[in-house]
Every structure is written in structure tokens, then in C-alpha cells.
Image (cartoon, rainbow, N blue to C red):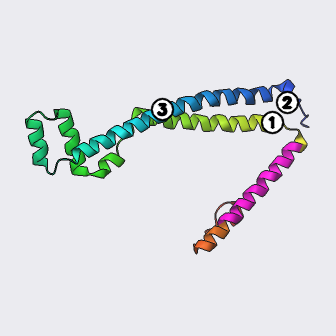
Amino acid sequence: MVRRYTDPDAAGYLLEADACKKVEAELRHSADKYKRKIDREQAKREAEFEAAMQYHSEEELLDAYGWEVITEEQYILYLGIFRQGRAALDNHTPTVNELTHRILLRILSDIAAGQREWCFSALTPAQQTAEIERAKRAKQEWCEKLRKIREDLGLAAKPDGPEAE
């Protein structure tokens, strides 16, 4: 079966690619919004860590709780931070905002791949062949750069990818 070239405008390939750009812009805006929320949450955790580190012992924390300087919730939080140190701040369980941001980035990646596919489909067969060759050359150049960097750093070249076989 012979594939015939289809006019990209008639097939709607370029419209699909433009639609992907619009959706990507909207999702990028949402992802940026969640990133700002994540940054605010991180700043709050940093402030809580600093507040917890004002106390020199667990007894001081208990006294502050007993004198109602801090709430029970703060006492539990500060005690955990005090016992675990910086690791409690750095290795926290992901928040809903962090998970939402991660999901949005995954969706953005998928949409970008779809957009590249629609743009590629809009090329003529000759342009598609040229683009495939260009991509192969770029990959080979990149692999060569990585090999040189490894040699310069004295790392043993580890064969990986299709050129290793």
C-alpha cells in the first residue's frame, strides 16, 4: 500500500498543533500557579523549622506547650522537627499541591510530544525524511559530546544505547 501525501492544512495537522500550543499555555499557567503555592508551603516549613530550632531541648518544647506558648499541634510538629532535624524539612511527604504540579508537568510533557507529532505529520515525506536524518545526526553528536566529557572527567566509557550493540 502506497502512502499518499496529504495536504497538512486540509488534514488539520497544523490546527491540532496550534490547539496543543493553546492548551500547553493554559496548563503552564496552572503549573506556575501551583509552583508558587509550593514555594509558599516551603517557606512556611522553613519558618516552622527555624521556630522549632529556637528550643534547645525537648524539655523546653514541653515547657512552652505547658505554658501555652505553643499549641498542641505546634508542639507535635516542633518535636518531630527537633528530633529529625533538617531531614524532616527536606524529606516531607508530598503535599497535594506538589502532586498536582507533578501531574500537570507530566500532562504538559505529553501535550508537547503530541504537538511535535502533529507538526511532523504536517511535513512532506521528503521533509520528514530530512527531519529524521537531522535528529539522528543530532543524537550522534550528543553521544559524542557525552563520550568526550566522560573521557575528560576520567570516567570509564559505559556502553549504552543502540551504538553499544
Q: Mark 1 or mark 3: name the one nearer the start of the chain.
A: 3
Q: Quadrant of residue 104?
A: top right
Which kind of residue does numbered mark 2 sit on? Pro
Up the image or down, 86 lies above or below 99; here it is below
Amino acid bearing label 3: Tyr
* Rendered location of residue 107, percent (x, y): 58, 34
At horizontal 50% and vertical 30% (from top left) the residue drawn is 33
Q: Is residue 136 magenta?
A: yes
Answer yes or no: do the residues labelled 1 and 3 have beta carbons within 8 Å? no
Q: Which residues are magenta?
A: 127-146
Labelled disc at residue 150:
none
Within-10-Å neighbours for mark 1: few <14, some 14–19, many 20+? many
The reply to whether the C-beta atoms of the residues labelled 1 and 2 are less than 8 Å apart is yes
Q: Are marks 2 and 3 in contact (CB under 8 Å)?
A: no
User: Does residue 157 show up?
Assistant: no
Image quadrant occupied by the C terminus: bottom right
Quarter of the figure with the N terminus = top right
Q: Residue 73: x percent and y percent?
A: 20, 33
Please name the residue that numbered disc 3 is placed on.
34
Residue bearing the label numbered 1: 121
Q: CA distance from mark 2 to mark 3?
A: 36 Å
Circle on res. 8: 2
- Quarter of the rendering containing residue 117: top right
Residue in the picture at 25% in, 46% down: 81
